[in-house]
Image (cartoon, rainbow, N blue to C red):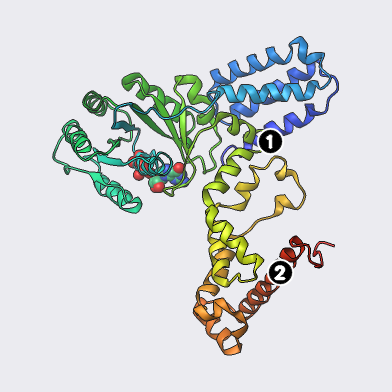
């Protein structure tokens, strides 16, 4: 997970000052030295660090902190505020054109994640804003780049406009926009070429595409794992193209976080999205305040709720509740529930979003292995429909067949059936209690 080292160090520093009833100038000095080192170690740009430390120190030494009843808390609040400001204050939405289509031009170095992000963005726009996106293949140099975009398009069922690799990108763009207008696509995403390093020919080509497409958004895609380099790249692209937004990819990796914390400050351009996985649904709007809370170990409850809401289908949840109440919950329902749990992502990532959960004894060691869920699902999938609906019919020979079919052991099959039976009994007790009937409370 990103920011791990920074998060640990800042939290340790904050811990020392949190409960203090009196904070002296010397305390602040010591704390700020540690904050400075933590940021530098996280590969944050040194000018940004200097400015950050100066601002926090000045505010922390202000009279209202020193005389407050909870100075330690106040100082932490200041650090949180300033971290949020550093990353842009609040979420900046993508620019939309009043007159469709909205045009987004994706730019960035090769390997930064442009093509992947183009697909993710198209999917997000269709899901969240009901848009009809069109992807445009303008990377005519890299072998298989067009094909890669087509594969992405197919995966999410979004059309890709291409004229092959013999037509110049500005001409492709011209024709793509005409096609979009004729066919009523209202969100056009242009995937441009990237190089390993910035060069003049590439920049000239991008300027041409910009002139033809007059984009509402020039989205610079940068790889968060490259740290300081990402900031330099952003500055160069911005000078030439005047970018309007940044997407930071690979924030799910163990990046130290320097790019996320420096880019806004150095370029003055907002981070609009972050890439949190390789999968097509792994693009999230960037919320500086939530990221700051997460770094400081204060959790990110809002993202947690949004994530849960997006993964759970409400009508299905109601249906399930009904089934639990009437004891008609089957192995098929269980299979579906496990899919929803998997869609939420790794459990330890989710736990990090809950304030304090990472410090709770036991909870911080809780680690659900996604493979275990796969094993359970494999066993259920090896059952026949009749068996899933009525596990009571599963005798020894059926169990043997299920074990062989799923590649799991007999004891695992036995355990699952027994646990499922217990789960159903538990559901019965709960629904009984709800209706006011007598039932044993399993927690007593
Ligand atoms: P392009 O050359 O800029 O078009 O980059 P690609 O879209 O081909 O991406 C390069 C690699 O980075 C691919 O393997 C992607 O799957 C991967 N990638 C892109 N975005 C993310 C992300 O947010 N998280 C992770 N883990 N991988 C990503």
Q: Left or right: 374 with respect to 201?
A: right
Q: Position of residue 197 (x, y in %)?
A: 33, 31
| Some atom of ligand 1 lies within 8 Å of the CB belonging to the residue at label 2 | no
Can the viewer see residue 111 in this picture?
no
189 to 92, vertically: above or below: below
> Where's the C terminus, which quadrant?
bottom right
Residue under the image location 51 percent in, 20 percent down: 265
Residue under the image location 64 percent in, 69 percent down: 326
Asked if the residue under mark 1 is in contact with the one under mark 2, i.e. CB atoms within 8 Å, the reply is no
Estimate the spatial distance between the alpha carbons at disc 2 and disc 1, rounded to whole Å. Answer: 37 Å
Furthest residue to the left? Answer: 166
Furthest residue to the top? Answer: 63
Find residue 298 and name its label.
1
Q: Left or right: 134 with respect to 79?
A: left
Q: Position of residue 103 (x, y in %)?
A: 30, 31
> Where's the N terminus, which quadrant?
top right
189 to 71, vertically: above or below: below
178 to 160, vertically: above or below: above
Q: Left or right: 163 with respect to 58?
A: left
Q: Residues within 10 Å of mark 1 (few under 14, many from 20)?
A: many
Q: Quadrant of ligand 1?
A: top left
127 to 104, vertically: above or below: below
**Which is more N-terminal, label 1 or label 2?**
1
Quarter of the image for residue 371 reads bottom right
Can the viewer see residue 92 in this picture?
yes
Observer-nearest residue: 47 or 219? 219
Residue under the image location 59 percent in, 65 percent down: 372
Residue holding disc 2: 428
Q: Position of residue 160 (x, y in %)?
A: 25, 45
Observer-nearest residue: 356 or 112? 356
Q: Is disc 1 placed on a helix, strand or loop?
A: loop
């Amino acid at each position: 997970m990103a920011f791990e080292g920074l998060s640990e160090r800042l939290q340790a520093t904050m811990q020392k000052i949190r409960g203090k009833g009196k904070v002296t100038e010397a305390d602040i000095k010591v704390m700020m030295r540690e904050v400075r080192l933590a940021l530098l170690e996280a590969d944050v740009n040194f000018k940004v660090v200097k400015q950050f430390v100066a601002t926090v120190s000045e505010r922390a030494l202000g009279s209202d902190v020193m005389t407050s009843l909870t100075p330690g808390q106040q100082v932490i609040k200041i650090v949180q505020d300033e971290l949020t400001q550093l990353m842009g204050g609040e979420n900046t939405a993508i620019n939309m054109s009043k007159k469709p289509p909205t045009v987004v031009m994706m730019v960035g170095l090769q390997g930064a994640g442009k093509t992947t992000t183009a697909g993710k963005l198209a999917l997000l726009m269709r899901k969240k804003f009901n848009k009809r996106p069109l992807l445009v293949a303008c990377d005519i140099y890299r072998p298989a780049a067009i094909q890669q975009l087509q594969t992405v398009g197919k995966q999410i069922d979004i059309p890709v406009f291409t004229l092959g690799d013999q037509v110049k990108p500005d001409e492709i763009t011209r024709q793509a926009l005409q096609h979009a207008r004729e066919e009523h696509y209202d969100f056009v995403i242009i995937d441009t070429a990237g190089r390993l390093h910035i060069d003049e020919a590439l920049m000239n080509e991008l300027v041409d595409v910009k002139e033809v497409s007059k984009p509402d958004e020039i989205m610079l895609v940068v790889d968060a794992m490259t740290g300081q380099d990402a900031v330099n790249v952003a500055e160069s692209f911005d000078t030439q193209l005047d970018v309007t937004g940044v997407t930071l990819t690979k924030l799910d990796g163990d990046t130290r976080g320097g790019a996320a914390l420096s880019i806004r400050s150095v370029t003055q351009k907002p981070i609009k999205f972050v890439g949190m996985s390789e999968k097509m649904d792994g693009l999230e709007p960037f919320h500086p305040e939530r990221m700051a809370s997460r770094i400081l170990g204060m959790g990110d409850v809002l993202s947690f709720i949004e994530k849960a809401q997006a993964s759970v289908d409400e009508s299905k949840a109601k249906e399930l509740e009904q089934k639990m109440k009437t004891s008609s919950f089957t192995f098929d329902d269980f299979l579906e529930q496990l899919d929803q749990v998997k869609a939420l992502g790794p459990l330890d990532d989710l736990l990090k979003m809950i304030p304090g959960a990472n410090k709770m004894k036991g909870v911080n060691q809780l680690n659900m292995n996604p493979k275990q869920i796969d094993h359970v699902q494999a066993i259920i999938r090896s059952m026949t429909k009749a068996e899933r609906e009525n596990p009571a019919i599963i005798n020894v020979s059926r169990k043997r067949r299920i074990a062989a079919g799923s590649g799991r052991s007999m004891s695992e099959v036995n355990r699952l059936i027994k646990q499922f039976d217990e789960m159903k009994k538990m559901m019965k007790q709960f629904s009984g209690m709800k209706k006011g009937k007598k039932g044993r409370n399993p927690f007593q």
